């Protein structure tokens, strides 16, 4: 099992393996599985999870900097 990397402080999302080979994206502040349009982001392959973590963190950082609405 691959150990999740420690998230950078400005990030909000990371990923974790569920023990069966599938991955979930989760909120590092709450520990809950992230949702996109009400759909839990679990049961993903590693590439999907990694890409989604990058996308969600980029959106989160942009919102915090006030560069998106």
Image (cartoon, rainbow, N blue to C red):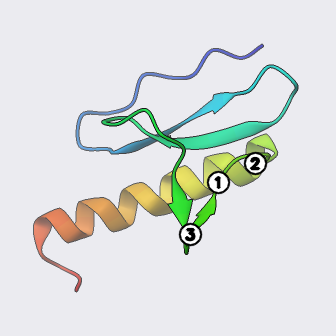
Few, some or many C-alpha atoms within 10 Å of disc 2 (few <14, some 14-19, many ≥20)?
few
Q: Position of residue 17 (x, y in %)?
A: 71, 27
Q: CA distance from mark 1 to mark 3?
A: 9 Å
> Which quadrant holds residue 23?
top right
Q: Residues within 10 Å of mark 1 (few under 14, many from 20)?
A: some
Q: Mark 2 or mark 1: name the one nearer the start of the chain.
A: 1
Image quarter (top left, top right, bottom left or bottom right) of the N terminus: top right
Q: Examine the rendered structure and indicate whether residue 9 appears above or below residue 37.
A: above
| Quarter of image, res 65 | bottom left
Contact between marks 2 and 1 (CB within 8 A): the answer is no
* Left or right: residue 51 compared with residue 26: right
Q: Is residue 39 above or below residue 15?
A: below
Q: Quadrant of residue 36?
A: bottom right
* Residue picked out by circle 2: 47
Q: Residue furthest front?
A: 38
The image shows residue 6 at horizontal and vertical percentages of 42, 22
Could you say which disc has been placed on residue 29 in the image?
Answer: none
Labelled disc at residue 41: 1
49 displayed left or right of 21: left
In this view, the mark in front (2 or 3): 3
State the residue in front, 10 or 20.
20
Q: Nearer the viewer, mark 1 or mark 3?
A: 3
Q: What residue lies at 82% left-to-right and 45% top-to-bottom?
A: 45
Q: Which residue is mark 3?
A: 38
Q: Position of residue 66 (x, y in %)?
A: 12, 75
Element under label 2? helix
Of helix, strand and loop, which one carries label 1? loop
Q: Are marks 2 and 3 in contact (CB under 8 Å)?
A: no
Disc 2/disc 1 C-alpha distance (Å) = 13 Å
In the rendered image, the vertical position of residue 23 relative to residue 34, given as above or below: above
Quadrant position of the C terminus in the picture: bottom left
């Amino acid at each position: 099992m691959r150990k999740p990397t420690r998230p950078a402080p400005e990030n909000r999302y990371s990923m974790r393996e569920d023990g069966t080979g599938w991955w979930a994206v989760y909120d590092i502040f709450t520990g809950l599985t992230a949702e996109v349009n009400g759909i839990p982001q679990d049961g993903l392959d590693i590439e999907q999870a990694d890409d989604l973590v990058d996308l969600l963190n980029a959106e989160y950082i942009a919102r915090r900097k006030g560069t998106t609405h």
